[in-house]
């Protein structure tokens, strides 16, 4: 009888221990994994599938560059590598953004991530939002390299980092 109760207690203990952290960690881990770029993944399929009407328009990149300097650089940096001051926006040169569908980026611009400091840009006419998408995507991915110590002798490193390989 004693052994039976002990076995019950143990299996019950295992059950609760096994269940609780698993349920908690899966949600918090999902959030952490995608971090500041999580919103791009939230774009609905319909928005994601929208093609950029300026896809093949070389002028769109130049127009987007001007718009970016005017509206976005203060937070995301002149080269979209991320803001440095207090009004900080993440780098838009990471693979998460560079490999996102144009429609997903457009959707983020249209809706913002207001609770996390990314404004809504629906006040910009749609063509301008698409031009911004063109510009961002024209920049290409830049792997996270330690800015502190530029190592000129090993420029080829950039090509072999896992971040750039997956981009
Ligand atoms: C006031 C500062 C600010 C300005 C101005 C700003 N952003 Fe952002 N942006 C942010 C912040 C902060 C985030 C990170 C949001 C988050 O944590 O999800 C972000 C995120 C993004 C993202 C990634 C989406 C994601 O999943 O979070 C894109 C793309 C982006 N911004 C594009 C732009 C463009 C294009 C402009 C100019 C039209 C712009 N931003 C202007 C602060 C800003």
Image: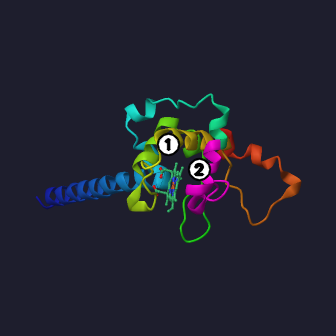
What range is drawn magenta here? 63-82
Secondary structure found at label 2: helix
Residue bearing the label numbered 1: 105
Nearer the observer, 102 or 110: 110
Q: Please name the residue shown 79% across and 49% down the image.
A: 157
Dot 2, how many residues are within 10 Å of its Cα: few (below 14), some (14-19), or many (20+)?
Answer: some
Residue bearing the label numbered 2: 67
Ligand 1 within 8 Å of disc 1? The answer is yes
From the viewer's perspective, tell me whether residue 128 is left or right of residue 60: left
From the viewer's perspective, tell me whether residue 72 is left or right of residue 115: right
Residue 25 in view, yes or no: yes
Among the 4 quarters of the image, the one containing residue 7? bottom left
From the viewer's perspective, tell me whether residue 10 is left or right of residue 31: left
Q: For the residues marked 2 and 1, what is the alpha-carbon distance in whole angstroms?
A: 15 Å
Of the numbered discs 2 and 1, the one sitting upstream in the chain is 2
x then y, percent, for residue 72: 56, 56
Among the 4 quarters of the image, the one containing residue 113? bottom left
Among the 4 quarters of the image, the one containing residue 114? bottom left
Q: Please name the residue shown 13% across and 61% down the image.
A: 2
Q: Locate the C terminus by quadrant.
A: top right
x then y, percent, for residue 11: 22, 54
Above or below — where is 130 with respect to 88?
A: above
Nearer the observer, 96 or 127: 127
Colour style of the rendered protein structure:
rainbow
Secondary structure found at label 1: helix
Dot 1, how many residues are within 10 Å of its Cα: few (below 14), some (14-19), or many (20+)?
Answer: many
Does the stretch in magenta take in 68? yes
Q: Residue furthest right?
A: 153
Does the stretch in magenta take in 143? no
């Amino acid at each position: 009888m004693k052994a039976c109760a002990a076995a019950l207690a143990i299996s019950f203990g295992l059950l609760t221990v096994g269940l609780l952290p698993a349920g908690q960690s899966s949600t918090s881990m999902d959030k952490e994994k995608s971090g500041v770029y999580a919103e791009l993944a939230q774009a609905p399929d319909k928005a994601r599938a929208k093609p950029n009407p300026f896809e093949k328009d070389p002028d769109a990149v130049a127009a987007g560059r001007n718009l970016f300097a005017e509206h976005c650089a203060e937070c995301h940096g002149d080269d979209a590598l991320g803001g440095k001051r207090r009004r900080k926006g993440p780098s838009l040169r990471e693979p998460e953004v560079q490999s996102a569908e144009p429609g997903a980026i457009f959707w983020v611009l249209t809706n913002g991530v207001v609770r996390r400091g990314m404004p809504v840009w629906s006040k910009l006419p749609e063509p301008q939002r698409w031009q911004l998408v063109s510009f961002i995507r024209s920049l290409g991915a830049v792997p996270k390299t330690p800015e502190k110590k530029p190592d000129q002798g090993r420029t080829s490193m950039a090509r072999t980092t896992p971040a750039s390989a997956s981009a």
